[in-house]
Amino acid sequence: MKFRLINSFPLVIPAVSGMEFYKGDLMMISDSANEISICNQQGKLIRILHSKNLKINELPKKDKADFEASSLLSYESSTFLLVLGSGSTVKNRNLAKLFDLNSEKTIQYDLFPFYAAIRTKYIIELKDWNIEALACYQDRLFFFNRGTNSIFEVNQTDFFNFLEQKSSSFASKKYQLNFNQLNGYDLGISSVNVDENGNFYCTASAENTSDWYNDGEIIGSVITIFNIQELKVEMTLQFEQFKINGKLAPIKLEAICQTNDRNRFFVASDNDGEISMLYEIELSL
């Protein structure tokens, strides 16, 4: 994999945690706000989805929905943006929102039963649960858990049938991602984008913290690529360090999306209270 930094732009959106490329613009979610921000490719905020103003309301950590994962998908003959709370606490963080991009329609779901079912099946404690990324490929949804660096695959129809209580169970698969450390610190998955060929482009970051709730000193981030055909129960990933001017940058990359140019991407940072940054990069396999 080859990586080249093209440009960088400051963002007014706080704590960017997910990003989608849609009709030439960038749709961004934040883990400290509930609005969906839409920016141009220079990072300028141009509108808020389903809103007539440009106001972003930040919430305190104990109250936020902690939207960390998003993906574009087709549902009921329309295009939607699905946004997920991380599920890292029992309170507040188990909300899913489905935004219709062709109307003002928004649907809400309680994710707690879904998350709880996966934790029970794979024996994962709540302290190790933090859904940070989501990818939709054809009719398959992939949920990325930073707490264990695991991927859970669920059929999209089964997922919505369960949330809408049309069924009481769903099938799932689990894949375990293994990383080498970054400068002696463990890496945790932080964002993902999947293209039409089934290539997953992922970011992972390392910080000096004892858990997934409290922030710590940021060590840096990496980018890794793998194909859907490579998915297996245990898989070890190679990665490229995210460097600026030849040095590992002490930033957390929490969002990645591919543009219409298959080698041109945008990534965004969430540096725990500092200004989020948008980076335009070139990636090639």
Image (tube, rainbow, N blue to C red):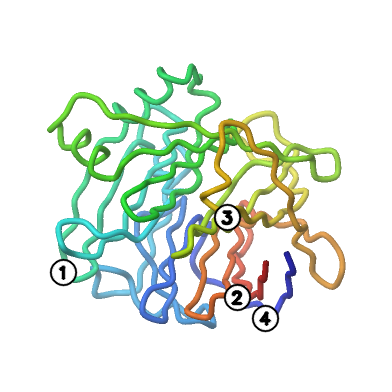
The picture places residue 19, in percent across and down from the top left corner, at: 47, 63
Residue identified by numbered label 2: 263
Please name the residue shown 79% across and 40% down the image: 181
Residue identified by numbered label 1: 103
The picture places residue 80, in percent across and down from the top left corner, at: 26, 61
Tell me if 61 is positioned left or right of 272 in this view. Answer: left
Q: Amino acid at mark 2?
A: Asn
Q: Amino acid at mark 1?
A: Ser
Where is the C terminus found, in terms of image quarters? bottom right
Of all residues, the one furthest to the left in this rendering is 166
Contact between labelled residues 4 and 1, with CB atoms less than 8 Å apart: no
Please name the residue shown 48% across and 63% down the image: 197
Q: Is residue 121 above or below residue 149?
A: above
Asked which secondary structure carries label 1, the reply is loop
> For the residues marked 4 and 3, what is the alpha-carbon distance in whole angstroms?
17 Å
Asked which secondary structure carries label 3, the reply is strand
Q: Looking at the image, is mark 3 or mark 1 earlier in the sequence?
A: 1
Q: Looking at the image, is mark 1 or mark 2 earlier in the sequence?
A: 1
Mark 1 vs mark 2: in front:
2
Residue identified by numbered label 4: 7
Contact between labelled residues 2 and 4, with CB atoms less than 8 Å apart: no
Q: Looking at the image, is mark 2 or mark 3 earlier in the sequence?
A: 3
> For the residues marked 2 and 3, what is the alpha-carbon distance in whole angstroms?
19 Å
The picture places residue 25, in percent across and down from the top left corner, at: 42, 78
> For the residues marked 1 and 4, what is the alpha-carbon distance in whole angstroms?
33 Å
Please name the residue shown 61% across and 68% down the image: 277
Q: Looking at the image, is mark 4 or mark 2 earlier in the sequence?
A: 4
> For the residues marked 1 and 2, what is the alpha-carbon distance in whole angstroms?
31 Å
Tell me if 28 is positioned left or right of 170 in this view. Answer: right
Q: Looking at the image, is mark 1 or mark 4 earlier in the sequence?
A: 4
> For the residues marked 3 and 1, what is the alpha-carbon distance in whole angstroms?
28 Å
